[in-house]
Image (spheres, grey):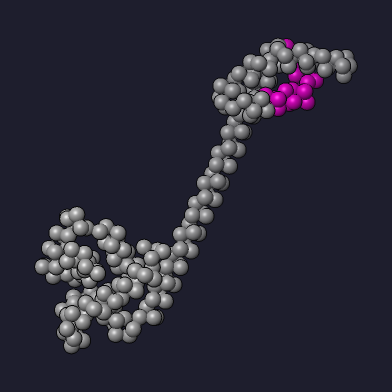
């Protein structure tokens, strides 16, 4: 699912700290924009935290 | 000199006078501390009941009777405070216990659900997801390790995330 060019997999890489620099910048730029979807971010973070 | 009513009716009459004389003062004292009409009335009544029960053993002087009533009422107020504190403590413990049980149950359900999702994921998707989640490998590292493209890795990660988001929608 695209979110202003940020995908779930971009977010997953960012949250799991396996992200490359380009994707990291893309995610951070998305987070600072109006397109930021906090619900999606929290969901992916929650999946990361709970699948430990 | 002790209070020595000559008969039961004398005792009642004497007690009635004492009741009228001291009730208001005692009630005001209790209410000032307790701020509750019914409990103030109840404790003052109990103080008078104790006076009635010990009527013959108390010195027949206003000072002694008033002192007896005040001390009894003070003790009743302290007992009441302790009972309330204990009740409050039990209520808090009960609430905490219920909340903990609910949290533990929910946590357990979540773990079960995650286990279920893992079991139902396609093997290849599961392997790739675990390499990312558990081994902390980047998409590029996974692609090299499995000899597949980064796009394929992303496809499987995305697939796993979709399943997790759907399966855990009540917990996220």
Is B23 located above or below residue B88 in the figure?
Answer: above
Work out which residue is located at the far right of the displayed protein and give it.
B7
Q: Is residue B55 magenta?
A: yes
**Principal secondary structure, stretch drawn in magenta:** helix
Is B108 located above or below residue B143 in the figure?
Answer: above
Give the image quarter of residue B85: top right
User: Going by the image, does B23 lie left or right of B112?
Assistant: right
Give the image quarter of residue B61: top right
Seen at 71% across and 16% down, the residue is B65
- Percent across and percent down for residue B53 are 78, 26
User: Going by the image, does B143 lie left or right of B125?
Assistant: left
The residue segment tinted magenta is B44-61
Q: Quadrant of the C terminus of chain A?
A: bottom left
Seen at 74% across and 26% down, the residue is B50
Q: Nearer the viewer, residue B26 or B2?
A: B26
Q: Nearer the viewer, residue B171 or A35?
A: A35
- Percent across and percent down for residue B128 are 26, 81
**Residue B9 seen:** yes
- Percent across and percent down for residue B25 are 63, 15
Seen at 68% across and 15% down, the residue is B22
């Amino acid at each position: 699912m695209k979110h202003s060019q940020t995908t779930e997999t971009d977010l997953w890489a960012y949250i799991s700290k396996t992200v490359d620099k380009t994707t990291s910048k893309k995610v951070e730029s998305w987070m600072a924009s109006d397109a930021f979807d906090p619900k999606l971010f929290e969901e992916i973070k929650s999946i990361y935290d709970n699948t430990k | 000199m002790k209070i020595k009513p000559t008969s039961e009716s004398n005792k009642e009459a004497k007690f009635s006078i004492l009741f009228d004389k001291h009730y208001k003062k005692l009630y005001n004292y209790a209410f000032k501390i307790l701020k509750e009409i019914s409990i103030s009335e109840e404790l003052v009544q109990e103080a008078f009941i104790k006076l009635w029960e010990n009527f013959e053993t108390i010195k027949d002087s206003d000072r002694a009777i008033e002192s007896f009533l005040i001390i009894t009422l003070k003790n009743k107020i302290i007992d009441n405070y302790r009972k309330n504190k204990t009740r409050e403590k039990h209520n808090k413990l009960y609430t905490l216990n219920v909340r903990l049980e609910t949290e533990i149950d929910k946590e357990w359900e979540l773990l079960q659900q995650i286990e279920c999702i893992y079991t139902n994921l396609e093997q290849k998707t599961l392997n790739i997801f675990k390499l990312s989640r558990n081994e902390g490998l980047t998409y590029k590292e996974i692609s090299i390790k499995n000899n597949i493209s980064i796009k394929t890795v992303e496809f499987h990660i995305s697939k796993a995330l979709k399943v997790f988001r759907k399966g855990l929608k009540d917990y996220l």
